[in-house]
Image (cartoon, grey):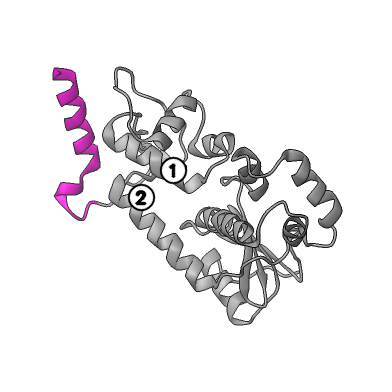
Protein backbone atom coordinates (compact mmCIF):
# COMPACT_ATOMS: atom_id res chain seq x y z
CA UNK A 1 0.00 0.00 0.00
CA UNK A 2 1.21 3.48 -0.70
CA UNK A 3 -0.21 7.00 -0.76
CA UNK A 4 0.17 8.79 -4.11
CA UNK A 5 2.31 11.91 -3.93
CA UNK A 6 0.14 13.81 -6.41
CA UNK A 7 -2.56 15.90 -4.70
CA UNK A 8 -4.81 15.77 -7.78
CA UNK A 9 -6.67 12.51 -8.36
CA UNK A 10 -6.42 12.80 -12.14
CA UNK A 11 -2.66 13.29 -11.96
CA UNK A 12 -2.29 10.32 -9.62
CA UNK A 13 -4.35 8.15 -11.96
CA UNK A 14 -2.28 9.21 -14.96
CA UNK A 15 0.91 8.34 -13.12
CA UNK A 16 -0.32 4.89 -12.17
CA UNK A 17 -1.52 4.25 -15.71
CA UNK A 18 1.91 5.22 -17.07
CA UNK A 19 3.64 2.70 -14.83
CA UNK A 20 1.04 0.05 -15.78
CA UNK A 21 0.06 -0.44 -12.17
CA UNK A 22 -2.58 -2.81 -10.83
CA UNK A 23 -4.61 -1.87 -7.77
CA UNK A 24 -7.28 0.42 -6.33
CA UNK A 25 -6.83 4.20 -6.21
CA UNK A 26 -9.04 5.72 -3.52
CA UNK A 27 -10.07 9.36 -3.39
CA UNK A 28 -12.48 11.55 -1.48
CA UNK A 29 -15.17 10.91 -4.12
CA UNK A 30 -14.76 7.20 -4.84
CA UNK A 31 -12.32 4.59 -6.13
CA UNK A 32 -10.86 3.54 -9.47
CA UNK A 33 -9.53 0.04 -10.12
CA UNK A 34 -6.65 -0.53 -12.52
CA UNK A 35 -5.19 -3.64 -14.13
CA UNK A 36 -1.86 -3.24 -15.94
CA UNK A 37 -2.48 0.49 -16.17
CA UNK A 38 -5.99 0.26 -17.67
CA UNK A 39 -9.10 1.24 -15.73
CA UNK A 40 -11.34 -1.79 -15.19
CA UNK A 41 -13.91 -0.40 -12.77
CA UNK A 42 -14.92 2.69 -10.80
CA UNK A 43 -17.24 3.27 -7.86
CA UNK A 44 -18.63 6.41 -6.23
CA UNK A 45 -21.25 7.01 -3.52
CA UNK A 46 -22.85 9.46 -5.98
CA UNK A 47 -23.45 6.82 -8.65
CA UNK A 48 -25.68 3.69 -8.47
CA UNK A 49 -23.66 0.51 -8.83
CA UNK A 50 -24.02 -2.09 -11.56
CA UNK A 51 -26.29 -4.35 -9.51
CA UNK A 52 -28.78 -1.59 -8.72
CA UNK A 53 -28.95 -0.62 -12.38
CA UNK A 54 -29.52 -4.18 -13.61
CA UNK A 55 -32.15 -4.94 -10.97
CA UNK A 56 -34.05 -1.66 -11.32
CA UNK A 57 -34.35 -1.91 -15.09
CA UNK A 58 -35.63 -5.47 -14.73
CA UNK A 59 -32.77 -7.09 -16.62
CA UNK A 60 -31.65 -9.09 -13.60
CA UNK A 61 -33.49 -10.30 -10.50
CA UNK A 62 -32.20 -9.44 -7.05
CA UNK A 63 -31.90 -13.16 -6.36
CA UNK A 64 -29.72 -13.74 -9.44
CA UNK A 65 -27.46 -10.84 -8.45
CA UNK A 66 -27.06 -12.12 -4.89
CA UNK A 67 -26.26 -15.59 -6.20
CA UNK A 68 -23.57 -14.25 -8.51
CA UNK A 69 -21.97 -12.29 -5.65
CA UNK A 70 -22.08 -15.28 -3.32
CA UNK A 71 -20.71 -17.84 -5.77
CA UNK A 72 -18.24 -15.78 -7.80
CA UNK A 73 -17.39 -12.71 -5.72
CA UNK A 74 -14.55 -14.36 -3.82
CA UNK A 75 -12.93 -15.43 -7.09
CA UNK A 76 -13.31 -11.92 -8.55
CA UNK A 77 -15.38 -13.10 -11.53
CA UNK A 78 -18.98 -12.00 -10.97
CA UNK A 79 -19.15 -10.60 -14.51
CA UNK A 80 -18.09 -13.84 -16.27
CA UNK A 81 -20.40 -15.80 -13.95
CA UNK A 82 -23.44 -13.80 -15.11
CA UNK A 83 -22.58 -14.50 -18.75
CA UNK A 84 -21.76 -18.18 -18.24
CA UNK A 85 -25.07 -18.79 -16.47
CA UNK A 86 -27.14 -17.02 -19.11
CA UNK A 87 -28.15 -14.08 -16.93
CA UNK A 88 -26.66 -11.58 -19.37
CA UNK A 89 -25.11 -11.71 -22.82
CA UNK A 90 -21.49 -10.59 -23.12
CA UNK A 91 -22.61 -7.49 -25.00
CA UNK A 92 -25.15 -6.58 -22.31
CA UNK A 93 -22.58 -6.98 -19.58
CA UNK A 94 -20.03 -4.81 -21.36
CA UNK A 95 -22.58 -2.09 -22.14
CA UNK A 96 -23.94 -1.95 -18.59
CA UNK A 97 -20.48 -2.12 -17.08
CA UNK A 98 -19.12 0.74 -19.19
CA UNK A 99 -22.16 2.84 -18.32
CA UNK A 100 -21.57 2.29 -14.59
CA UNK A 101 -17.80 2.82 -14.93
CA UNK A 102 -17.99 6.14 -16.79
CA UNK A 103 -20.81 7.35 -14.56
CA UNK A 104 -18.87 6.75 -11.33
CA UNK A 105 -15.61 8.02 -12.82
CA UNK A 106 -17.21 11.37 -13.62
CA UNK A 107 -17.70 12.02 -9.89
CA UNK A 108 -14.37 10.52 -8.85
CA UNK A 109 -12.54 12.83 -11.28
CA UNK A 110 -14.36 16.05 -10.40
CA UNK A 111 -12.05 19.04 -9.94
CA UNK A 112 -10.74 19.19 -6.40
CA UNK A 113 -10.85 15.43 -5.90
CA UNK A 114 -7.71 14.20 -4.14
CA UNK A 115 -6.23 10.70 -3.86
CA UNK A 116 -6.06 9.25 -0.39
CA UNK A 117 -4.35 5.88 -0.88
CA UNK A 118 -3.42 3.25 -3.45
CA UNK A 119 -3.82 -0.45 -2.64
CA UNK A 120 -1.36 -2.13 -4.96
CA UNK A 121 -2.57 -5.45 -6.32
CA UNK A 122 -6.20 -4.96 -5.23
CA UNK A 123 -8.82 -6.30 -7.64
CA UNK A 124 -12.57 -5.86 -7.90
CA UNK A 125 -15.08 -8.66 -7.33
CA UNK A 126 -16.69 -8.01 -10.73
CA UNK A 127 -13.62 -9.09 -12.65
CA UNK A 128 -12.21 -7.51 -15.78
CA UNK A 129 -15.00 -6.85 -18.28
CA UNK A 130 -13.95 -4.06 -20.67
CA UNK A 131 -10.80 -2.10 -19.74
CA UNK A 132 -10.70 1.63 -20.50
CA UNK A 133 -7.64 3.83 -20.99
CA UNK A 134 -7.18 6.37 -18.21
CA UNK A 135 -6.82 9.25 -20.69
CA UNK A 136 -10.10 8.26 -22.37
CA UNK A 137 -11.78 8.37 -18.98
CA UNK A 138 -10.43 11.85 -18.37
CA UNK A 139 -11.54 13.14 -21.79
CA UNK A 140 -15.06 11.85 -21.23
CA UNK A 141 -15.23 13.46 -17.79
CA UNK A 142 -14.09 16.80 -19.22
CA UNK A 143 -16.66 16.49 -22.03
CA UNK A 144 -19.44 15.85 -19.52
CA UNK A 145 -18.50 18.85 -17.39
CA UNK A 146 -18.54 21.05 -20.49
CA UNK A 147 -21.98 19.72 -21.43
CA UNK A 148 -23.37 20.56 -18.01
CA UNK A 149 -21.99 24.10 -18.20
CA UNK A 150 -23.55 24.63 -21.61
CA UNK A 151 -26.94 23.59 -20.25
CA UNK A 152 -26.84 25.64 -17.03
CA UNK A 153 -23.48 26.71 -15.53
CA UNK A 154 -24.49 26.34 -11.91
CA UNK A 155 -22.59 23.44 -10.24
CA UNK A 156 -24.36 24.00 -6.91
CA UNK A 157 -27.43 22.34 -8.44
CA UNK A 158 -25.54 19.04 -8.68
CA UNK A 159 -25.35 18.40 -4.94
CA UNK A 160 -28.22 20.36 -3.38
CA UNK A 161 -31.70 18.94 -2.77
CA UNK A 162 -33.93 19.24 -5.82
CA UNK A 163 -36.81 21.59 -4.99
CA UNK A 164 -39.64 21.71 -7.58
CA UNK A 165 -41.16 25.11 -8.28
CA UNK A 166 -44.91 25.46 -7.85
CA UNK A 167 -47.22 26.45 -10.68
CA UNK A 168 -45.23 24.96 -13.52
CA UNK A 169 -46.78 22.91 -16.32
CA UNK A 170 -45.93 19.37 -17.32
CA UNK A 171 -42.46 18.40 -18.50
CA UNK A 172 -42.45 16.65 -21.89
CA UNK A 173 -39.18 14.75 -21.37
CA UNK A 174 -39.83 11.40 -19.61
CA UNK A 175 -36.47 11.36 -17.83
CA UNK A 176 -37.03 14.82 -16.39
CA UNK A 177 -40.57 13.88 -15.39
CA UNK A 178 -39.22 10.88 -13.49
CA UNK A 179 -36.84 13.16 -11.59
CA UNK A 180 -39.62 15.60 -10.69
CA UNK A 181 -41.92 12.82 -9.53
CA UNK A 182 -39.50 11.80 -6.75
CA UNK A 183 -38.05 15.25 -6.02
CA UNK A 184 -39.50 16.01 -2.58
CA UNK A 185 -37.33 18.97 -1.70
CA UNK A 186 -34.92 16.90 0.38
CA UNK A 187 -33.41 14.43 -2.11
CA UNK A 188 -30.22 15.38 -3.91
CA UNK A 189 -29.59 14.35 -7.55
CA UNK A 190 -27.41 11.46 -6.31
CA UNK A 191 -30.15 10.21 -4.01
CA UNK A 192 -32.67 10.44 -6.84
CA UNK A 193 -30.33 8.49 -9.13
CA UNK A 194 -30.00 5.69 -6.55
CA UNK A 195 -33.76 5.64 -6.01
CA UNK A 196 -34.45 5.37 -9.75
CA UNK A 197 -31.48 3.09 -10.44
CA UNK A 198 -30.32 5.26 -13.30
CA UNK A 199 -27.19 7.14 -14.33
CA UNK A 200 -26.24 9.77 -11.77
CA UNK A 201 -24.69 11.98 -14.44
CA UNK A 202 -27.87 11.83 -16.54
CA UNK A 203 -29.85 12.74 -13.43
CA UNK A 204 -27.59 15.74 -12.78
CA UNK A 205 -27.98 16.75 -16.41
CA UNK A 206 -31.78 16.54 -16.13
CA UNK A 207 -31.70 18.64 -12.95
CA UNK A 208 -29.65 21.35 -14.67
CA UNK A 209 -32.06 21.34 -17.61
CA UNK A 210 -34.99 21.61 -15.23
CA UNK A 211 -33.27 24.47 -13.39
CA UNK A 212 -32.55 26.28 -16.65
CA UNK A 213 -36.22 25.97 -17.64
CA UNK A 214 -37.45 27.12 -14.23
CA UNK A 215 -39.00 23.83 -13.12
CA UNK A 216 -36.79 23.51 -10.03
CA UNK A 217 -35.19 26.06 -7.75
CA UNK A 218 -31.63 27.11 -8.49
CA UNK A 219 -29.60 26.79 -5.26
CA UNK A 220 -28.29 30.02 -3.83
CA UNK A 221 -24.51 30.16 -3.79
CA UNK A 222 -23.24 30.93 -0.24
CA UNK A 223 -21.80 34.41 0.16
CA UNK A 224 -18.38 33.10 1.16
CA UNK A 225 -18.13 31.01 -2.01
CA UNK A 226 -16.53 32.55 -5.11
CA UNK A 227 -19.05 33.63 -7.77
CA UNK A 228 -19.42 31.63 -11.00
CA UNK A 229 -16.94 32.55 -13.77
CA UNK A 230 -18.04 35.65 -15.65
CA UNK A 231 -15.96 35.77 -18.78
CA UNK A 232 -18.87 37.11 -20.81
CA UNK A 233 -21.50 39.59 -19.52
CA UNK A 234 -24.09 37.54 -21.39
CA UNK A 235 -23.40 34.55 -19.15
CA UNK A 236 -24.24 36.23 -15.82
CA UNK A 237 -26.50 33.44 -14.61
CA UNK A 238 -27.48 35.25 -11.41
CA UNK A 239 -28.77 38.14 -13.50
CA UNK A 240 -30.58 35.80 -15.88
CA UNK A 241 -32.23 34.08 -12.92
CA UNK A 242 -33.49 37.39 -11.53
CA UNK A 243 -34.82 38.45 -14.94
CA UNK A 244 -36.59 35.13 -15.42
CA UNK A 245 -38.20 35.32 -11.98
CA UNK A 246 -39.34 38.88 -12.61
CA UNK A 247 -40.91 37.96 -15.93
CA UNK A 248 -42.70 34.98 -14.42
CA UNK A 249 -44.07 37.16 -11.60
CA UNK A 250 -45.74 39.42 -14.20
CA UNK A 251 -47.47 36.50 -15.97
Residue lying furthest bottom in this view?
19
Is there a contact, CB below 8 Å, between mark 2 and mark 1? Answer: yes
Quadrant of image for the N terminus: bottom right
Looking at the image, can residue 74 be seen?
A: yes
Dominant secondary structure of the residues highlighted in magenta in the image: helix
Q: Nearer the viewer, residue 96 or 106?
A: 96
Q: Quadrant of residue 85?
A: bottom right
Position in image of residue 50 (x %, y %): 64, 50
Q: From the image, tell me which residue sits under label 1.
A: 204
The residue to which callout 2 is attached is 148
The local crowd at label 2, few if under 14, some if 14 to 19, many if 20 or more residues have their Cα within 10 Å, is many
Estimate the x, y position of residue 88 in percent, counting from the top left.
Answer: 68, 54
* Residue 224 visible in rendering: no
Q: Please tell me which of labels 2 and 1 falls first in the chain.
A: 2
Residue found 75% across the figure and 46% down from its top: 65
Above or below, 13 against 163 in this view is: below
Q: Is 37 located above or below residue 31 in the figure?
A: below
Q: Secondary structure at mark 1?
A: helix
Q: CA distance from mark 2 to mark 1?
A: 8 Å
User: Quick check: 10 left or right of 115?
Assistant: left
Which residues lie in the magenta part?
230-251
Amino acid sequence: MRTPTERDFDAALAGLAAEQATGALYGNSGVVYLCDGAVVHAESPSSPDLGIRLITCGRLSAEAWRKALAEAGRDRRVGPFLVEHGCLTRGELELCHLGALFDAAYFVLLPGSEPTRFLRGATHWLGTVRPVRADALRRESVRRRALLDRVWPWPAADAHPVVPRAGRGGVPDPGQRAVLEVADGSRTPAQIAWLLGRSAFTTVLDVRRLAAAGYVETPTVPRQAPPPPDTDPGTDIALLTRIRDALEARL
